[in-house]
Image (tube, rainbow, N blue to C red):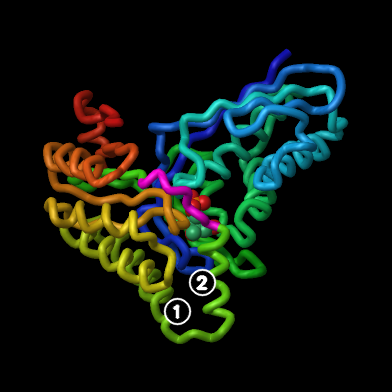
Amino acid sequence: MIGYGQAHGKVILMGEHSVVYGYPAIAIPFFEAKVICEVYPRDGAIWLESDFYTGELLAAPVERAHLVSAIHSSLDYLNQERKDLTIKIKSDLPSSRGLGSSAAVAVAMIRAIFHYFRRNISEQELITLAHEAEKIAHGNPSGIDVLTTAFDRPIWFRKGGEDRQSKELKPMDIEVSAYLVVGDTAILGQTREAVLKIAQSKGAKSEVTEKRLAELGEYTVQAQECIKENEPLKLGDLMSKAHANLKELGVSHPALDRLVDKAMHMGALGAKLTGGGLGGCMICLTDSYQKAQEIAAGLEQEGAKGTWIYPMSKALRDMPEQTQTLH
Ligand code: PMV
């Protein structure tokens, strides 16, 4: 008997960081890279096999505590003992790059454990268990990573208050005549630190921080309009404005800024960091596939270690030559 579970990455188009404070965000599933988990029987302590660590689960490095928690809480939830399993993780989703790898690993892992014990998992059970693991990974996660890595549609998301009453979660149709290029700095992003940095300056009642977060929220609202109206030029402009704010909030990185500047010099409609920042990935928008290819090549010359092109409408995605992945 084996258990199997998988999940994909995510790209935040607009609203990272401000989403933690109740402003909306727009996120897109990133199908180009996946996490796969397999669970096998064994006798004794739980054994973990992955690129980052192989050995007994309880001896896993402290930065994998969220994973240990996802495994233990799934087993506890299913009234199973914390033993007698080998768990294998295979991933081509680069970790700590703002592409949601910690959430994707948790989602794939929870699915695999439920599958191993032949138990169905509801959407709500999956979200709740993965969110608990994300709290350990990120401190105060908005929940957007879990929702985008677990399901297949772009989403509009606004985290609820304490009572969760004001929470908004809507699948979005994104039909914009444009291409998104993702560029990976290969520098490890630091979501936890970045979230903490903003929390500290917010806690110190920084008016600038409040203002920049509110503006980020406003740009996201406007971006939703641009998506509805198919206005890539305006959408690009909002992305660049969002990057300026994120930079001012102190969560960018010189390598991200370099790639953002390069993309803009090469004619992108807009560019920004994506995800937690302090490293990780950036995204930019282009008006043609050829421009997307040129910019992807330019980003690689500028030091990007990987680039991906994502057509922003189904019609564009259905053209086979345009779904190719560049590395
Ligand atoms: O770095 P990632 O892929 O985990 O994205 C984090 C997104 C933040 O808005 C910065 C944090 C959150 O929990 O929403």
User: Depth check: 155 or 219 in front?
Assistant: 219
The N terminus - image quarter = top right
The three-letter amino acid code for the residue at tag 2 is Ile
Residue for point 66% across, 43% down? 64
Q: Residue at x 42, y 83 (%)?
A: 208
Does residue 12 show up? Answer: yes
Decide: is 261 above or below 221.
Answer: above
Circle 1 packing at 10 Å, graded few (<14), some (14-19), many (20+), is many
* Position above or below: 94 against 26: above
Q: Secondary structure at mark 1?
A: helix
The x and y percentages for residue 256 are 33, 55
**On the image, which quarter does residue 212 sit in?**
bottom left
Image spot of residue 42 (x, y percent): 80, 17
Q: Which residue does the numbered mark 1 point to in the structure image?
A: 209
Q: Give the number of the disc on residue 196.
A: none
Please report whichever mark, 2 or 1, sits nearer to the chain's N-terminal start: 2
For residue 198, the mark is 2
7 displayed left or right of 327: right
Picture residue at 62% right of the left edge, 62% below the top: 140
Q: Is residue 182 magenta?
A: no
